[in-house]
Amino acid sequence: MSTFGFTPAELRFLRSLKTPAGIQRFIDRVPYHLAATSWSPRLVMREQTAHCLEGAIFGAAALRVLGFPPLIFDLEADRDTDHVVAIYQVRGHWGAIAKSNYTGCRWRDPVFRNLRELAMSYFDVYFNLRGERTLRAYSQPVDLSRFDKLNWMTAEKSVWFIAEHLCHIPHTPLLKPWMAKSLQRLDKRSFDAGTLGLRKK
């Protein structure tokens, strides 16, 4: 059985997560950090903190250890930062594992028939600090095994090459132009709920 370059202790920990929901529980438990880093899953385990990109990459590696393909996809935003999530399928339906500074942009149960449905599940809760709904497009799945030669799971250096790849692949629009122009801002109650526990610099 492949160890994917992890130490025995790292493998035991990843296997102890057991399910996609177990992976999400770990990602939820570690603090969100605001540094401009791109840590590998090994460094996330060592430092016990992660942001959106690192959480998705960690999620993909942990899914791989549990027997799933190591897939991520990118949610592209306007006047906001993109959001990256690890994705997986159960009986043909998509779910997601994610780390976010916003309460609604995390876990998704595997109930979505296709990636557009999964992406749209984030639409209403994906907003910037001006209360504007900002999600606009999504990418196709990226299998991170394509980066195995770069040791993406265990690198001691940054894995920015994953983010750079996401920036250069095609994205599918979610909205028609007239839809984007007519979007309403969030009401205060929804904004407050979505930013509960928000970490700021």
Image (spheres, rainbow, N blue to C red):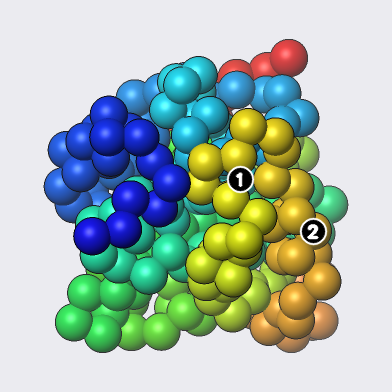
Disc nearer the start of the sequence (1/2): 1
Q: Is residue 175 above or below residue 108?
A: below
Q: Which residue is mark 1?
A: 53
Type of residue at label 2? Glu
Q: Report which quarter residue 27 is drawn in.
A: top left
Query: Residue 199, percent across and down?
Result: 60, 19
Q: Is residue 80 left or right of residue 10?
A: right
Q: Which residue is mark 2?
A: 164
- Secondary element under disc 1, as helix, strand or loop, is helix
C-alpha distance separating marks 1 and 2: 11 Å
Query: Residue 144, percent across and down?
Result: 54, 65
Crowding near pointer 2: few (<14 within 10 Å), some, many (20+)?
A: few
For the N terminus, the image quarter is bottom left
Residue 77, numbered circle:
none
Q: Is residue 22 left or right of residue 152?
A: left
Check if mark 1's residue and mark 2's residue have beta carbons within 8 Å: no
Query: Residue 173, percent across and down?
Result: 70, 81
Type of residue at label 1? Leu
Q: Report which quarter residue 133 is drawn in.
A: bottom right
The answer to whether residue 190 shows anywhere in this view is no
